[in-house]
Image (cartoon, rainbow, N blue to C red):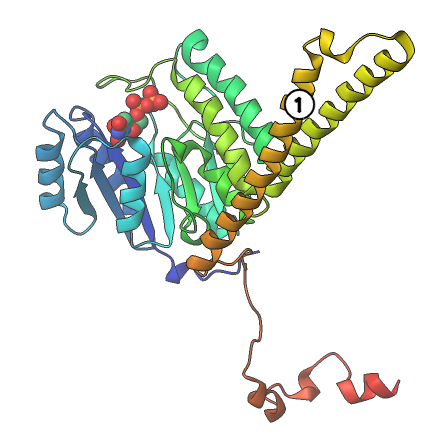
Amino acid sequence: MNKNNETEESLSVVIPVYNEALSLPLLHKSLCIALGGLSIPWEVIFVDDGSQDNSIEILGDLTATDPDHTSLVVLRRNFGQTAAITAGIDHAMGNIIVLMDADMQNDPADIPLMLEKIHQGYDVVSGWRKNRQEKYLTRVFPSQVANKLISWITGVELHDYGCTLKAYRREVITGFRLYGEMHRFIPAFAGSVGARITEVEVCHHSRKFGETKYGLERTFKVILDLFTVKFLIGYADKPMRVFGGMGLLLIFASAVVILYLMVRRLFFLVSVFTSPMLTLSVMFMIMGFQSILMGLIAELLARTYHESQHKPTYTVREVLNMLPLEMRDLHIVNPSQSKLPPCSEIEKG
Ligand code: UDP
Ligand code: MG
């Protein structure tokens, strides 16, 4: 599995920062300790997401004192964690990207172990806060439910989607854009392009500096986002399956109701106009046809999406021995070294 040459690898740690002035100096120090011994080049990219405290000044100082390893991207206003992460990834140079929070709840000391897993051939290494240091009822329990739900619906089983500390091979996360608050679904998107995914247990600390930016309402947002993610992952290239499926279901329901009304009229002499069921079946029929027509429009949109960007409908892990046709006859591979018999013998036999 160890197909990548370690020396060609490089690491970018992307950290979104929103009002985290208190934790930043310690965070930078622990990053330097954790990454200082690495044998590959590394950088830390802080993204200031419109902080109103003095995070920018502190980040400016850190960048000035450690220009070899630290960069800073300052957003014009608060765009949210997902947008900040995307900005960081867009500016990152490394072919391995580690995402983490700035609040010191994650521990940079876990990064080398994650890199080890990447070297073993995994494309995504997901941090799992097994001993999570937060309130059970408002944080840990909603997160456990969300993780089960996300794993079940997306088919990418992880214990901790909510843990930002994760390592990615660049190529499995740069093929899609993240909208809204979709950063927690990155492993699911990566899984949909065929990434090899594993988990490692990581340390987790209670928040000692600053305060959390999220409340319980996040659970509802996550559930709504899950619909979008399921659609994008499963049906973005075949939307007719969803719209058309729904359409057929509605038309079938309409037909059942009409049949029931007809049977009632013929055998029990009950007029079809006495109940609202006729209206119901007509409504189902119209909605069914509308849904199928929407499916057709969605199919057109899917084609525009892929073809306008020359975006293939597949992803390639690697390509072996692709040669121009004219070079095929030059016998570049010495047949005597091949364990297989020459093609001419196979044809004869
Ligand atoms: N964050 C951000 N923009 C925001 C909200 C949060 O960049 O609008 C950053 C924040 O500074 C932290 C990370 O996202 O580095 C996670 O935020 P937080 O610790 O509040 O989330 P929690 O750990 O409570 O889920
Ligand atoms: Mg936090």
- Residue 248 place in picture, x, y as percent: 69, 33
Q: Farthest residue toward the right? A: 267
Q: Label 1: which residue?
A: 282
- Residue 59 place in picture, x, y as percent: 14, 37
Compared to residue 296, the image places residue 325 above or below, namely: below
User: As rendered, which of 61 and 297 lies closer to the eye?
Assistant: 297
Cβ at disc 1 under 8 Å from ligand 1: no
Element assignment for label 1: helix
Compared to residue 18, the image places residue 326 above or below, namely: below
Q: Is residue 73 left or right of residue 113?
A: left
Q: Residues within 10 Å of mark 1 (few under 14, many from 20)?
A: some
Q: How many marks?
A: 1
Residue located 21% across and 18% down the image: 210
Among the 4 quarters of the image, the one containing residue 256: top right
Residue located 89% across and 15% down the image: 266
Q: Is residue 77 left or right of residue 302?
A: left
Compared to residue 183, the image places residue 10 above or below, namely: below
Q: What residue type is labelled 1?
A: Val
Residue 140 in sight: yes
User: As rendered, which of 199 and 250 lies closer to the eye?
Assistant: 250
